[in-house]
Image: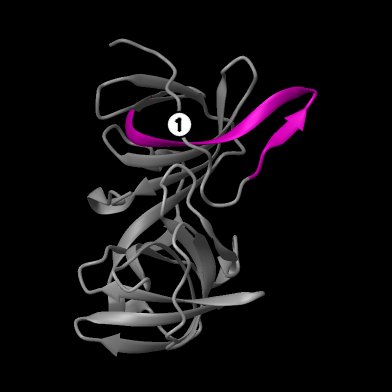
Amino acid sequence: MKRQLLRFTALAFGLGFAAVGVAQSSQTLRGHVGAVEGNTLHLESAAGQDTIVELPDSARVTLRVPATLDAIKPGTFVGTAATPGPNGTLVASEVHIFPESRARTGEGHRPMPGLPGSTMTNATVAGVSATPADPGTMTNATVENVGSAGNARTLRLTYQGGEQTVVVPDKTPIVTVAAGSRASLTPGAHVIVYAQRAANGALTAQRISVGANGSVPPI
């Protein structure tokens, strides 16, 4: 199989630029596990390209486990990717439910790098709000109240310094985050790798999200 390094978009969940002696940058890599050989992960793209990623013992592995809208309760901390609908209100394309131990992880609302017009919000659900979000942003927060809107749920998400309203259609993928391990990196599993790329192009994984039960995010 042809091996080459791929170019990827900047990390969407808030890991910033790092520079220690030599230039390094945060990277987000998406694909399927080709193989794990010792401390090396072979990441396969849809086009069959093989990206080599170093896999240190410190790399944290988590699972994306499919859930339902009913799992979103008042006080739940969620992360949702969204784009503005026709009236400007954010419409979720995916919602992550964080465990209590990771509440307030990446809290806030910001643009999704590499996906113009998309946002990520990590926040707590607080109520129903008519306040639309500006296009092209990203949010992390906690759920305090969930209101219905037709066949969707409307979440008012609050985070330190602000709030957003996000409509979650009933077919939107909902996942919970669970602990994983290196054993979760089985061939064919879909993964999102959050890595550091050194000036020489070498990639080192810091965190890996593995889709359980065939879970593949829509973005």
How far from the left and from the top, in percent, is residue 209?
A: 43, 47
Name the residue rendered at 46%, 71% in the picture.
133
Q: Say if the magenta span includes residue 200.
A: no
Q: Residue furthest front?
A: 87
Is residue 219 depicted above or below 70 in this figure?
above
Specify the principal SS of the magenta part: strand
Is residue 154 depicted above or below 181 in this figure?
below
How far from the left and from the top, in percent, is residue 128?
A: 42, 88
Mark 1 highlights which residue? 8
Q: Say if the magenta span includes residue 33.
A: yes
Is residue 140 depicted above or below 8 in this figure?
below
* One can see residue 205 in this view: yes
Total count of labels:
1
Picture quadrant where residue 159 is located: bottom right
* One can see residue 175 in this view: no
Q: Which residues are magenta?
A: 16-35
Name the residue rendered at 42%, 85% in the picture.
130
